[in-house]
């Protein structure tokens, strides 16, 4: 009997740890609803990282995000922060606080890589910076590409078939589990669906209460393509970016001060941002709000303890003003709207 008690005391040191890990994993799966992404499941709430480039601030934000429960991280070669994300991911995995399979990592093919002969090169560069062997999702960032020359901006001829076939080869090579698109139009997606062997798993587009894109969202979802909303809060700091690159500031819509959203938020004891994000989630969209502020990181994640009524959803639907509310029109690429593949027309 004494020997048995000794064994119990010895092994009981390990039981609480195993139990906590198991419960934590189960709770995490329950806490974060998902949408299909090919054969994978993508967490509906992710962390957007555009304009998050200050190393110390961003590292602190990533550590807090992982503590809060974020597991879906969205980045891009264009954002120039993949190496920071890779550093923090490596720290968490090495410390055994996370496993690679716990994470859903998304990055994107940059504009100078949008060519059939350069897809593999730029994907491998992203993997190296992220410290990963395989991505969960790799997106074509734009439906148009430019030459690799840094001296002049010369756009490539549209070649969606060749580029998509190069993307498919990355899945076959095991460098990414799924592939998708960003900023494409209905007609451009429809064209890819006609010849693809591997269907786009996800389409990442600008969606918020003032730019709801119902036709594009419905088209994607009808064809089994998940939709992720970037700038889901209207990109409040976009003018800061424009000023940084020497462009004129614009009069932008403000989701966070809208009185209709505010009235609904008050009823639910939530913030305008939480209601705006919840509206998109109830349309079955994944959302990737960007923040490095601790309070906002927490509140942006706290979306699953309330629901908007049908009447509230319809009220917010009336706020849609379409293309006039588009923030990320990518016009900081000179004359990009003259490119045949530029997707943001009055009609897709």
Image: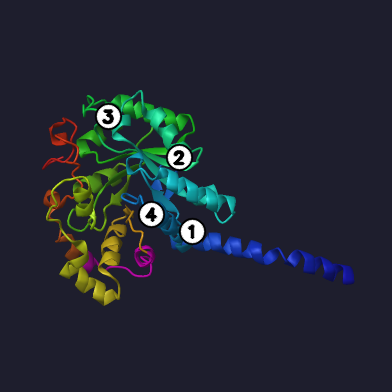
Is residue 293 positioned above or below 145 on the image?
Answer: below
Q: Spatial distance from mark 2 to mark 3, Cα to Cα?
A: 21 Å
User: Where's residue 344, x and y in %?
Assistant: 16, 41
- Circles 1 and 2, Cβ within 8 Å, touching? The answer is no
Q: Spatial distance from mark 2 to mark 4, Cα to Cα?
A: 20 Å
SS class of the residue under badge 4? strand
Give me the residue at 30% from left, 45% from top: 204
Q: Spatial distance from mark 1 to mark 4, Cα to Cα?
A: 14 Å
- The label nearer to you, 3 versus 1, is 3
- The label nearer to you, 1 versus 4, is 4
Q: Which mark is residue 150?
A: 3
- Circles 3 and 1, Cβ within 8 Å, touching? The answer is no
Dot 1 or dot 4: first in sequence order is 1
- Residue, disc 2: 129
Q: Which mark is residue 29?
A: 1
For residue 37, what is the image quadrant? top left
Dot 2 or dot 4: first in sequence order is 4
Residue closest to the eye, 221 or 88: 88
Dot 1 or dot 2: first in sequence order is 1
Residues in magenta? 294-313
- The label nearer to you, 4 versus 3, is 3
């Amino acid at each position: 009997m004494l020997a048995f008690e000794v064994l119990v005391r010895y092994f009981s040191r390990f039981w609480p740890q195993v139990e906590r890990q198991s419960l934590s994993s189960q709770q995490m799966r329950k806490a974060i609803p998902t949408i299909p992404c090919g054969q994978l499941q993508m967490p509906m709430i992710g962390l957007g990282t555009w304009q998050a480039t200050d190393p110390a601030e961003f590292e602190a934000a990533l550590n807090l995000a992982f503590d809060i429960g974020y597991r879906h991280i969205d980045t891009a070669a264009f954002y120039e922060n993949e190496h920071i994300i890779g550093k923090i991911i490596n720290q968490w995995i090495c410390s055994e606080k996370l496993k690679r399979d716990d994470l859903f990592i998304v990055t994107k093919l940059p504009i100078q890589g949008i060519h059939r002969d350069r897809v593999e090169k730029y994907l491998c560069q992203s993997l190296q910076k992220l410290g990963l062997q395989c991505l969960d999702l790799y997106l074509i960032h734009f439906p148009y590409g430019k030459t690799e020359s840094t001296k002049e901006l010369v756009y490539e001829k549209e070649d969606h078939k060749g580029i998509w076939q190069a993307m498919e080869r990355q899945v076959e090579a095991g460098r990414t589990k799924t592939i998708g698109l960003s900023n494409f139009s209905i007609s451009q997606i429809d064209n890819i669906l006609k010849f693809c062997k591997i269907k786009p798993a996800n389409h990442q587009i600008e969606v918020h209460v003032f730019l709801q894109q119902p036709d594009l969202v419905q088209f994607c979802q009808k064809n089994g393509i998940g939709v992720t909303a970037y700038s889901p809060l209207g990109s409040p700091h976009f003018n800061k970016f424009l000023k940084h690159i020497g462009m004129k500031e614009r009069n932008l819509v403000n989701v966070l001060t809208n009185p209709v959203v505010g009235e609904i938020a008050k009823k639910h004891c939530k913030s305008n941002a939480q209601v705006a994000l919840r509206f998109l989630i109830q349309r079955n969209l994944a959302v990737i709000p960007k923040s490095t502020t601790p309070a906002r990181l927490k509140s942006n994640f706290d979306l699953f303890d309330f629901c908007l009524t049908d009447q509230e959803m319809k009220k917010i639907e009336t706020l849609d003003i379409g293309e006039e509310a588009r923030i990320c029109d990518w016009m900081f690429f000179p004359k990009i709207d003259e490119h045949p593949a530029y997707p943001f027309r009055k009609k897709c």
